[in-house]
Structure formats: structure tokens, C-alpha cells
Amino acid sequence: MAKDFRFGFGLHAAARQSSVQEWAHRAEEMGYDVLHVPDHLGAPAPFPTLMTAAAATETLHVGTFVLNAGFYKPALLARDVAAMRDLTGGRLELGLGAGYVEAEFVAAELPFPTARERVDHLRHVTEYLAEHVHDVPILIAGNGNRLLTVAAQRAQIIGLTGGDPASEGGDPLAERISFVRNAAGDQFDDLELNIAITAMPIDDSGIPDLSITRRFLPELTDEQLLRTPGVLSGSTSDIADEIRRYRDVYGVSYIIVQQPHAEAFAEVIAQLR
């Protein structure tokens, strides 16, 4: 049975309390289910920003997309997560990732572990949180085999980057979902599958601005970027049809867009509900 759609957007720029509250109100009115904040040095601190948004709304969930697990010790993170859970009335959803920006580890005066060590730490953090704050939903986002194995076995929500472009010879998103299915076993049907959209049209041209996507996938050409699952093109109706296809074909029912796309995607949400 197809899961109900859920929609979120990432708040990247909101330095003032009034701005955070305004965006939170607008998100709730536009039909979004979750407001997300990333975890990067130089960006707003996740938990204070999310608490400000939650305090200004009634039903909007708030979440991290995603915390860099390497920045945190499990017990200290669990304390903050429990406080956020209680202060938001149970509206917190915790997104976790292994961390990948070496310069941020350096700036934080932390050693930069190997990829294997970062995923091992992510597993350790996730297992601790599952034991101590088990009622907070966990999203784990990534693409590699070891990370997706942790996600399939320990998280409730799987963030699929699906960064490789689709081609006549294959479907990388379908392959990653198949991998998750095998790793999750009997609990796969209970998982919620998510994709973060990084480019879509914000005017009537139907042409997406690829600047955000290009930062994450600098090695791909524009033509290849347009064939990645995180890029949407066409009219509002075209995009709504594509989102339906994501659910019907792949089982992806949770869609996150970025702050510059929030208003344009709200028109898509209206067609899907």
C-alpha cells in the first residue's frame, strides 16, 4: 500500500528570530509537514533554530537534515534530542549523516576520521539514540553501501541521495532502493523513503537552476544533472506527475525541497493533496 506523501523544506538562511518564525508560519500554511535545518559551520545552529520554529507553530514538525554525527558524543546528543522532543511536544525528527566536509572537522578542532570510521561512529550514535530516545524518528541520509546498511537496519526514514544520473543502461535510484530492501529484510515495508530535491523551476520557464545541485555533484555535466532524481523540470503539473511516479515506481513518499524552492513547490503540494 502506498504511503501518504510528506513534504519538507530546508531552511538555510534565517538569522533573526522573526525570520525563522515567519518561515515556519508560511511553511505550515503552504502545506509542509517538516521544516529542516542543516548542520554546517557557518550556517544557523540547528537546535536553537528548530526550537524557534517549533515555538511559533502548532503542527509543523522540525528536523535536522542532517546532523553530522561526527560532531557529537552520543550521550550529549541524546540529552539535547530528549529536550527538543519534550519542548516541541514530540514534533522533532532527527536526521543524521556520517559527515563529509573535512574543512569543518578541522575548523571544529576535531580529527577527520576515515570514511569507514565515520560510518562506524554514525552506527554507534544511532544505536545509542535508539536505546535512550527511542520515540524520536531517525532519518539517515547517504548513498554508500555501509551507510545505507546502517540506515536500513537502524533508521525509520531513509534519505536517498540517488546522485548518479539515470541512463538507458541502468537506474541508480532503483538499485539503491533494492540494496536498502535487501539490507532491511522484513522491516523494509515499515521504512519511509525520502529524496531531497536540490533543483526545480521557480518561474514559468520550466528550467531548474542547477547551482545547488552542482555544488554536490561538480563532476557531472548539466545534461547529467538533469537526469538525477534530485532535479525536477517542467510545469507544476509535470513536477506533480514526477512526484507521483517517485511514489508509484520507487516507493518514495517523503520529498524535501530547499528554501529557494519552497513557494514554487507549494503549488505542487496543492496538486498532490
Image: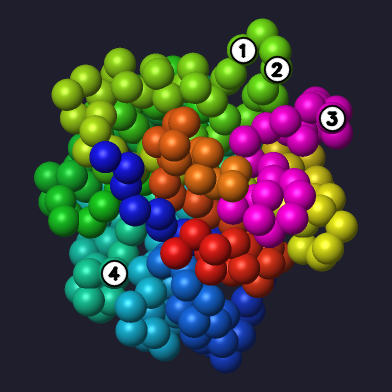
Closer to the chain start, of discs 3 and 2, is 2
Dot 1: element: loop
Q: Please, which residue is most extreme toward the top here?
A: 169
Task: Specify few, some or many for label 2: CA neighbours under 10 Å numbering under 14, 14-19, or 20 or more.
Answer: few
Please state, as top left, top right, bottom left or bottom right, where the C terminus lies in the image: bottom left
Dot 4: element: loop
Q: Please, what is the dominant secondary structure of the magenta stretch?
A: loop
Residue 147, how many percent across, how many down?
Answer: 41, 26
Q: Label 4 sits on what residue type?
A: Arg
Distance between mark 2 and mark 4 Cα atoms: 39 Å
The answer to whether any part of residue 182 appears in the image is: yes
Closer to the chain start, of discs 1 and 4, is 4
Circle 3 residue: 223
Q: Do the residues labelled 1 and 2 touch (CB within 8 Å)?
A: yes
Closer to the chain start, of discs 1 and 3, is 1
* Residue stretch rendered in magenta on the structure: 217-240
Q: Label 2 sits on what residue type?
A: Ser
Q: Nearer the viewer, mark 1 or mark 4?
A: 1
Residue pictured at 42% horizontal, 25% vertical: 177
Distance between mark 3 and mark 2 Cα atoms: 11 Å
Q: Nearer the viewer, residue 251 or 231?
A: 251
Report the side of 263 relative to 202 (left or right): left
Residue 150: name its quadrant: top left
Distance between mark 1 and mark 4 Cα atoms: 38 Å
Circle 4 residue: 91
Circle 1 residue: 170
